[in-house]
Image: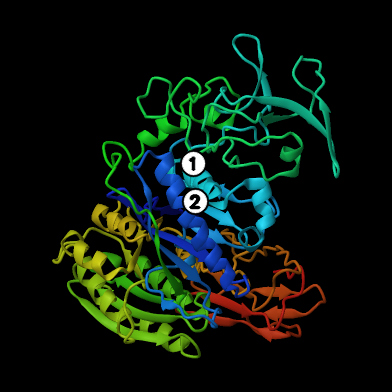
Amino acid sequence: MLGLALKCESVFNTVKLESNSYQGLLVAINPEVAEDYRIVEAMKDMITEASQVLFTATHKRAYFGHVTILVPKTWTNGIYNSSHEESYNLADVLVASPNPMYGDNPYTLQYGQCGDPGSYIHFTPNYLTDDTFVNDYGPRGKTFVHEWAHLRWGVFDEAPTEGTDPFYWDNSQQIQATRCPTGLDGINVFYTSDNPVTYRTCQSSRNGLPEEGCVFVPYESQNVNVSLLSHQYIEQCYNLKCFKLMIFLLKVIEFCDDANQTLPTTSNNNAHNTEAPNEQNRLCGMRSVWSVMRSSVDFNGTNFPNDGISDVTPTFTVARARTFEKFVLVLDVSGSMNGDKIISMKKAASLFVTQFLPNGTKVGIVKFEYTATILQNLVVVDNNRDQLANVISNLVANGGTCIGCGILDGITVLGSDGEPAAGGNLIVLTDGEENQSPMVIDIRDEVLNTEVVVNSIFFGVSTANQDLQDLCDDTQGVWFFNDDMDSGALIQTFKQLSNLNDGDVYNEKFQIYGQSFSVPANEIVNGSVYVDSSIGNNTVFTFSYSSYDSPHVLLYSPSGSTFCSMVPPVDCAAYASVDTQFKTITFQVPGTAEHELKH
């Protein structure tokens, strides 16, 4: 029987627009980026410039207040503050190596629909430190605001992008370039050479539109100042091609809006172009960028234009990522957990401490029923994994359910190493509603003040504890539903929760294969796992079973070596670790696993 593991992530964002000022913006530099403080200074300069651009573009409704820049823990040459709740996976802006799809181009990862916030903005070190990129994208501050609009308000490009048409017939049967607004005048040209720059007049294609490869270039004199989602790069013309065309353009400093709005600079020339076949029209139902922005939590009945603000310069904190992560297991041992539930929980939690957590991580253990009990204060995970598993193996189910007690003791454990609890992770597993005080709702404010992250596993229940679910959302945690019929699904949930998500892919553990199946008595099941050359260090094969007797598992490497779970009538290169209590079979493959190791 297959189980269900459902992961639900919060769309909660720590960035808040309060009194016209964005607070809580987090920028994180990927661990693979070599230490270079120029990146930090360039980021500060870009956001400082962007703050003034944003204040102008939103008609004095928003600017950037406080920003935290998180540098990798491997950066040691500068003077950095200590990080607390900040972590790479929670960052709004990432600085990392080029994405093969985008190269050094700035981009925002957007999965949602119109109005839905994006995941993050991506910049590369090259973009930030090489000023030649300004030639293509214009001032970095305007580029940042362009990407911020994607991230924060869920709007889309108004200029032609891949998959959209650069030209179209309008309702008056006139040829138009895809842009916003239509008041942005220009010429259509076909570049024939970059060095030296030469061009010719575009020819018509079969459908009467300009030929493929034709581009729209704005004229020198303009009567518009929009749109940052269409031509944000227009400040003055840096590009050599523009100089050859003698284009020196009015600054583009605002967003397109509906013609009937009363914003100060909105006119028919600046009005939204509803006919252009661009992403904004396609995904937002012909709505203007400002129409979407006005319906956001930032501007819907709040943060009105403020003429009293004169200084929009952001402040910055530069912090270094923690050298370790902290986890506390907060485990439900109430009476309803008796039987298969507590066996499955102990199996998954034991694998969490024995296999999933990287060395150097700190972990603690708390149990709760009528009250809570601290079983293990924070210790560094190293050669003590079996001792930690023994603590879990001794758990017995009985009593009521005091989730609030467990959370409070978990916070105490997070601070038991003498460091702040802030930024530490609680993993709360429960199978039912709380029936003992303090309730989760009663301790909510106290938990939020500690700045810890609460993650939850709702095990074998059809309805979550809403207060606990909300607490996860409010602390940027995640919550899972797990069907209690499949212990394998619960194991995978703990595996996901063990991922540090610090951007360090070289030290991250990845699951490359997983399957659940039934094996009839006296039958054999064969399978294979492909391990390519990019992975294979410290490879672990884990089999969990539910039968009374342990199955016999054989692994065969491509070179012919055999790994066994018990002594068979064949020569074995190594033997598995068999845990009959938790019903797991674990193979630790020494060194680097050979490709296509089979079972």
Extreme left residue here?
A: 437
Amino acid beneath label 1: Gly
Q: Is residue 468 left or right of residue 353?
A: left
Residue 319 rendering spot, x and y as whole percentages: 44, 73
**Quadrant of res 364:** bottom left
Q: On screen, 365 above or below 162? A: below
> SS at mark 1?
loop
Q: Can residue 488 be seen in this view?
A: no
Residue at mark 1: 112
Graded by Cα atoms within 10 Å as few (under 14), some (14 to 19) or many (20 or more), the crowding at tag 1 reads few
Q: Is residue 178 visible?
A: yes
Q: Residue at x 61, y 33 (%)?
A: 159
Q: Which residue is drawn at 52% across and 51% down?
A: 141
Q: On screen, 129 above or below 310? A: below
Q: In which quarter of the image is the C terminus?
A: bottom right
> In terms of sequence position, does the residue under pointer 1 or pointer 2 come before the other?
1
Amino acid beneath label 2: Ser
Out of 184 and 541, give the one closest to the viewer.
Answer: 184
Residue at mark 2: 119
> SS at mark 2?
loop
Q: Is residue 420 left or right of residue 293?
A: left
How many marks the image carries: the answer is 2
Q: Which residue is drawn at 83% across and 27% down?
A: 200
Q: On screen, 510 above or below 292? A: below
Extreme bottom residue here?
A: 383
Q: Is residue 383 left or right of residue 329?
A: right
